[in-house]
Image (spheres, helix red, strand yellow):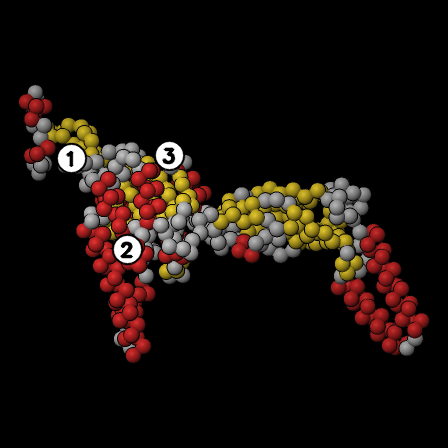
Amino acid sequence: MTVTGRAALAALVGTLVTLLLRSTVALATVDGIILAGIGLDLIRAAGIRQLILTRSGDTSILLGQQGTVLLTIANPGRRPLRGIVRDSWQPSLRAGDPVRVAIPAGGQVSVTTKLAPNRRGDKAAGPVTVRSVGPLGLAARQGSRLVPWTVRVLPPFLSRRHLPEKLAVLRQIDGQHRSLIRGQGAEFDSLREYVIGDDVRSIDWRSSARRAEVVVRTWRPERDRRIVILLDTGRTSAGRVAGVPRLDSYLDAALLLTAVAARAGDRADLLAVDRQVRARVVGANRMQVLARMTDAMAVLEPELAESDGGLIASTLLRTARQRSLIVLLTDLNSAALELGLLPNIPLLARRHRLLVAAVADPRVAEMAAARGDAVSVYQAAAAQRAEAGRARLAVRLRRAGVAVIDAPPDRLPSALTDAYLELKSSGQL
């Protein structure tokens, strides 16, 4: 039970009347009228327990977009229900305000709740609170019911805007232009007549001997190559760069790379590891891999502990038994890598082609260039020291045969995909 603002207003008016008449009889009369009205409302208000509540609507929403969930309320009772419904959700979903409803006896209504999430993950619905107001509007019956429903908030895939550009490059590599140079990742495509400027090493002498003209072999990048993307979800992935956690930048880069690789005919797998394996998408076909990865990424959160380099290496070796492209999305943090993954890099580099991608902080570069006052000079010195540490670590990785990409969050997805396309075009994948 709950009283409404109208009951408070009636009590205020009754108080004024009592003060005006200065009589205990008036006080008792006013109180009796108000209590009688409240009792009548509670008796005549439609019941809450008999209501039938069901949900329908979106079960997944992209971060940054809106979704809707419908709450259907059926009133099988004999009295109409007039009141307010509050469909509560977690604050990060930014659900709408309570709504007024009028449900006739034996009827039903649907309440639409708009959700605008600002965080990834699984978001469960809270209790539904229904307030059934009596005919006088002085009091209401109120109750809460739990109507289960979960919405998964997916990564936004902001780098999707680069997809047409990358697919155009891919078509040039594999379709419109055939390579005349055979690489490790190239297979024979066709023969064509020699033209001036062609590499003489591509001439097929046996076929030329059987024909009246000189012909050359053309090659195309092989399909069905394997890419294993590993997300380091340890403590360094929790750091924010340009207001966005590094992990979210990793997810965006991995999605763009996966989308392009799937169109190129290659297989992409996903691992998320810190001190344990947090996510694993292995063996998905090219039509489903992007959806499965997006679904697995939705619930990933940074683990505030140092990643286990040995576990990362062993997980990669168990997952990729044949030579593959291993993409490590991690931070170029010397304290974390030197004690964790760095000792295992030589073993991984012998068996696979490695590519390390990291998020660079543009604010550090700005600080390194500042010289306005004493504080700026000290900040610049600290920034330059941080940049030098990252550069030394990148040099060590490159000497071990690892390709390194260190780019700001807005450029990382494009730079990583460009590196993959470069490997394809040069026949190294």
In the visual, does 419 lie left or right of 40?
left
Which residue is located at x 79 percent, y 64 percent? 7
The spot of residue 99 in percent (x, y) is 66, 54
Which residue is located at x 74 percent, y 53 percent? 142
State which quarter of the image contains the C terminus: top left
- Labels 3, 2: front one: 2
- The answer to whether 194 is drawn above or below residue 2 in the figure is above
Mark seen at residue 283 = 3
Which residue is located at x 57 percent, y 51 percent? 114
Do labels 3 and 2 touch, CB within 8 Å?
no
Q: Residues within 10 Å of mark 1 (few under 14, many from 20)?
A: some
Three-letter residue code for mark 2: Glu
Query: Where is mark 1, residue-wise?
Result: 182
Query: Where is mark 2, residue-wise?
Result: 338
Q: CA distance from mark 3 to mark 2?
A: 31 Å
Q: CA distance from mark 3 to mark 1?
A: 28 Å
- The answer to whether 288 is drawn above or below residue 97 in the figure is above
